[in-house]
Image (spheres, rainbow, N blue to C red):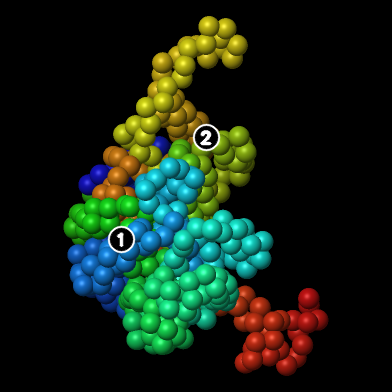
């Protein structure tokens, strides 16, 4: 694998004996995953997805991506949660957080439908003014408020520019294979549709059509991404205490039992920011229930060393860090020589910035461990499609095993429905009336 788990900065806080002691629980949780026998097992379709996927739909998806690249300057991806986080994370990790501003021969990819901000929609409409665009709307039902509102707006803009028939050729719908409001509407309108698999929840869906269409439009090699995930699938199917996912799940649960209630995913490259956001949804929605679960947080160092770094170093000892690093250099930029040496940095002249960044990481690992914060280091050999595919599958599998070890169903999310009921009641949606007037009194 291109991914390894470095435990040197975790070992002072969790001995090998402690890890081995919890391994039977990890193995039992993994056995539930492999046997598809635990709670929510009907949502384990991602488990063998890297090899067992619909080849015909995948071929259609790649053709649709080619068509979008040929006729559009912009793709608007409409979705919320797992319907957009995964694809955005992959694009920014492999291309750049500034992908849309860079010179390129592929369309810009903007994301909408992940909030209810009118100003955000206004800005997106101004960005596509005078530019040919297509839309990929992603929703299992088609009735989730945020993406449904955005789809109304961008569909109207497409029809205004290209007419109903022209708009239909630029709208791509990723939804349920058979049922739902959006599926029925798409069939009537003649939109091309792709499938949100019944057995894959949103936060596990990045390697399905949900994530792969926008990723392919951005010119990323989806074959290599899936190949990397398939490699991880095979490697992580071997049980035992040497399994990297077993060890990560074991350390997470050990630290949780020792009172470390927060896990911070730390990166040292800005291109990791959206991957952090995807990771937070994956673990937060999977484990945060029944009064249990680590709180997933994230930082991008060295930037956040000048803000949250103070708390991590010297605040309450309630957290541990998982540091994700890419071992191979990500840039050839170097520190230039300055004859005046105004800043006193000539001792670094000629040094690659990547090496300086790595030194900052190493110094921080020692400092935080000395300060009482355990650190698990995930080492990715390179910044490539194959390596990222491995990492995505590693996190998904580790999350399932860790959730079962914790004693929760990793595949449901009952808590996210509560705010929706209240919001619909306040907005007067039929069927969500508040007969006691409780909400009105509180608000």
Q: Is mark 2 on a helix, strand or loop?
A: loop
- Quadrant that contains the C terminus: bottom right
Q: Residue at the location (33% across, 52% down)? A: 219
Decide: few, some or many residues near mark 1? Use Cα within 10 Å; few <14, some 14-19, many ≥20: some
Which of the 4 image quarters holds residue 409?
A: bottom left
Q: Tell me if residue 240 can be seen.
A: no
| Residue that label 1 marks | 66
Which of the 4 image quarters holds residue 205?
A: bottom left
Q: Is mark 1 on a helix, strand or loop?
A: helix
- Residue 419 appears left or right of 81: right
Q: Where is residue 75 in the image (x, y as percent from the top left)?
A: 44, 61
Q: Residue at the location (69% across, 82% down)? A: 427
Which of the 4 image quarters holds residue 365?
A: top left
Q: Where is residue 352 in the image (x, y as percent from the top left)?
A: 40, 23
In the depicted view, which residue is nearer to us: 73 or 42? 73
Q: Tell me if residue 117 can be seen.
A: yes
Q: Where is residue 378 in the image (x, y as percent from the top left)?
A: 35, 44
Q: In this view, does 240 lie above or below 184?
A: above
| Residue that label 2 marks | 302
């Amino acid at each position: 694998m291109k991914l390894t788990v470095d435990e040197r900065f975790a070992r002072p806080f969790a001995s090998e004996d402690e890890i081995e002691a919890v391994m039977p629980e990890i193995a039992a949780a993994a056995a539930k995953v492999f046997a598809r026998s635990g709670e929510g097992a009907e949502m384990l379709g991602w488990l063998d997805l890297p090899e067992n996927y619909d080849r015909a739909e995948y071929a259609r998806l790649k053709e649709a991506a080619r068509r979008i690249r040929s006729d559009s300057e912009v793709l608007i991806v409409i979705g919320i949660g797992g319907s957009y986080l995964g694809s955005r994370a992959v694009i920014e990790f492999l291309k750049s957080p500034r992908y849309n501003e860079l010179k390129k021969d592929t369309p810009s990819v903007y994301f909408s439908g992940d909030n209810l901000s009118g100003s955000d929609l206004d800005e997106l409409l101004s960005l596509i003014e005078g530019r040919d665009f297509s839309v990929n709307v992603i929703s299992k039902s088609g009735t989730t408020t945020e993406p449904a509102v955005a789809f109304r707006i961008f569909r109207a803009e497409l029809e205004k520019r290209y007419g109903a028939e022209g708009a239909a050729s630029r709208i791509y719908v990723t939804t349920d294979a058979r049922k739902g409001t959006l599926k029925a509407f798409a069939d009537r309108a003649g939109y091309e549709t792709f499938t949100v698999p019944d057995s894959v929840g949103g936060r596990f869906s990045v390697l399905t059509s949900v994530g792969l269409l926008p990723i392919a439009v951005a010119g990323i090699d989806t074959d290599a991404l899936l190949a990397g995930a398939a490699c991880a699938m095979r490697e992580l199917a071997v049980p035992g205490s040497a399994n990297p996912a077993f060890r990560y799940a074991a350390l997470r649960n050990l630290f949780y039992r020792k009172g470390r209630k927060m896990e911070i995913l730390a990166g040292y490259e800005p291109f990791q920011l959206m991957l952090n956001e995807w990771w937070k949804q994956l673990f937060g929605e999977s484990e945060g229930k029944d009064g249990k679960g680590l709180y997933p947080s994230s930082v991008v160092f060295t930037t956040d060393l000048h803000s949250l770094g103070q708390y991590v170093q010297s605040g309450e000892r309630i957290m541990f860090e998982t540091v994700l690093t890419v071992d191979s250099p990500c840039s050839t930029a170097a520190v230039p020589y300055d004859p005046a040496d105004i800043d006193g940095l000539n001792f670094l002249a000629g040094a690659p910035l990547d090496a300086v960044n790595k030194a900052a990481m190493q110094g921080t690992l020692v400092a935080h461990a000395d300060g009482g914060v355990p650190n698990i280091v995930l080492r990715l050999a390179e910044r490539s499609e194959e390596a990222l595919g491995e990492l995505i599958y590693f996190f998904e599998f580790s999350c399932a095993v860790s959730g079962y070890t914790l004693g929760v169903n990793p595949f449901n999310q009952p808590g996210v429905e509560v705010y929706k009921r209240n919001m619909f009641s306040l907005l007067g949606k039929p069927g969500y009336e508040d007969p006691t007037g409780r909400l009105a009194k509180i608000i």
